[in-house]
Image (spheres, helix red, strand yellow):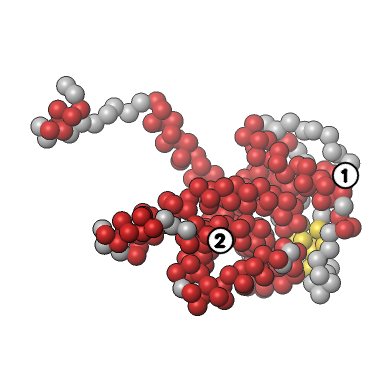
């Protein structure tokens, strides 16, 4: 019997679960478990004098990749929340626009190393004895490499919503919340997704600078794939080491060139002298 005939007669139709559905469920559960494991490691106790040793064994690469990818995704979620709030306020209010857009332009022009000069000390002091402090400083550094262009893209899309769509939403008398999620966000999504991809690509380089930081005489090295490659370069072990996980290797490929370039030019990477930050 046809599906339309079943619906017309009020008979519910349930499609049998296939192996594709089971594979999708297992994949979602695996991703949630991996992200949960990565997030759990971000709240472990942290002692500066007894930091974890970066292992160069190929078996450690999947774990380091998980830590780095978790930081990147956390920064991307924070960038999305910032984009939806900041850009919306600038687009909806003329007075707010006169202040927020020039401020956003100024924030975009500040180098990432400039933010690290004070955020590292702030977050480490905010969570003493916990690795969450350095982790939040790293996430914030990646956030500053992702958020600005996403906010500009979303703001521009909100200002250019077609008049016919605007009139249609007013005709249906949708609420401000419905207009935002059913009209403005879908209209802005193509440009926002493009800028999210560019932000993720640009954020890989700043992971190198944020996973290994020293404040004065105190050095903080967070486990991550870029920190591992930095250690390999410093020890002269730059040859290829195959990973036991093809997925981890695929995630780590974009970081290898940037991390080795940054470690090879460590003397040129210096934050403002007030913080005395060094990398790699």
Q: Give whichever of 260, 40 is nearer the camera.
A: 260
In the depicted structure, whether residue 92 falls above or below residue 39: below
Structural distance between the alpha carbons of marks 2 and 1: 41 Å
Residue 219: x and y in percent read 79, 62
Q: Is mark 2 on a helix, strand or loop?
A: helix
Q: Give whichever of 138, 169 is nearer the camera.
A: 169
Quadrant for the N terminus in the image: top left
The answer to the question of whether label 2 and label 1 lie on touching residues, with beta carbons closer than 8 A, is no
Q: Count of labels shown?
A: 2
* Residue 144 seen in render: yes
| Residue marked by disc 1 | 235
In the depicted structure, whether residue 60 falls above or below residue 45: above
Residue 234: x and y in percent read 87, 47
| Residue marked by disc 2 | 151
Q: In which quarter of the image is residue 123?
A: bottom right
Report the side of 178 relative to 108 (left or right).
left
Point out the tag, 2 or 1, that comes first from the N-terminus.
2
Q: Which disc number belongs to residue 268?
A: none
Q: Is mark 1 on a helix, strand or loop?
A: loop
């Amino acid at each position: 019997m046809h599906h339309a005939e079943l619906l017309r007669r009020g008979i519910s139709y349930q499609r049998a679960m296939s192996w594709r559905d089971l594979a999708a469920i297992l994949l979602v559960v695996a991703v949630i478990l991996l992200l949960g494991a990565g997030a759990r490691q971000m709240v472990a106790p942290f002692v500066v004098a007894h930091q974890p040793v970066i292992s160069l064994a190929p078996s450690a690469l999947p774990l380091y990749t998980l830590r780095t990818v978790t930081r990147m995704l956390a920064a991307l979620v924070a960038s999305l929340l910032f984009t939806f709030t900041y850009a919306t306020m600038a687009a909806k209010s003329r007075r707010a626009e006169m202040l927020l857009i020039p401020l956003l332009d100024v924030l975009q022009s500040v180098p990432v190393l400039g933010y690290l000069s004070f955020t590292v000390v702030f977050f480490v002091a905010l969570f003493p004895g916990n690795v969450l402090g350095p982790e939040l400083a790293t996430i914030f550094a990646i956030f500053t490499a992702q958020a600005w262009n996403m906010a500009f893209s979303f703001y521009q899309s909100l200002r250019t919503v077609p008049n016919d769509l605007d009139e249609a939403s007013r005709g249906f008398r949708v609420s401000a919340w419905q207009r935002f999620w059913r009209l403005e966000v879908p209209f802005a999504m193509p440009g926002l997704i493009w800028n999210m991809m560019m932000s993720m690509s640009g954020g890989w380089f700043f992971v190198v600078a944020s996973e290994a930081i020293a404040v004065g005489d105190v050095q903080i090295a967070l486990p991550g794939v870029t920190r591992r490659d930095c250690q390999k370069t410093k020890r002269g072990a730059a040859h290829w080491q195959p990973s036991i996980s093809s997925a981890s290797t695929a995630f780590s490929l974009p970081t290898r060139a940037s991390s080795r370039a940054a470690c090879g030019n460590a003397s040129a990477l210096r934050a403002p002298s007030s913080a005395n930050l060094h990398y790699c």
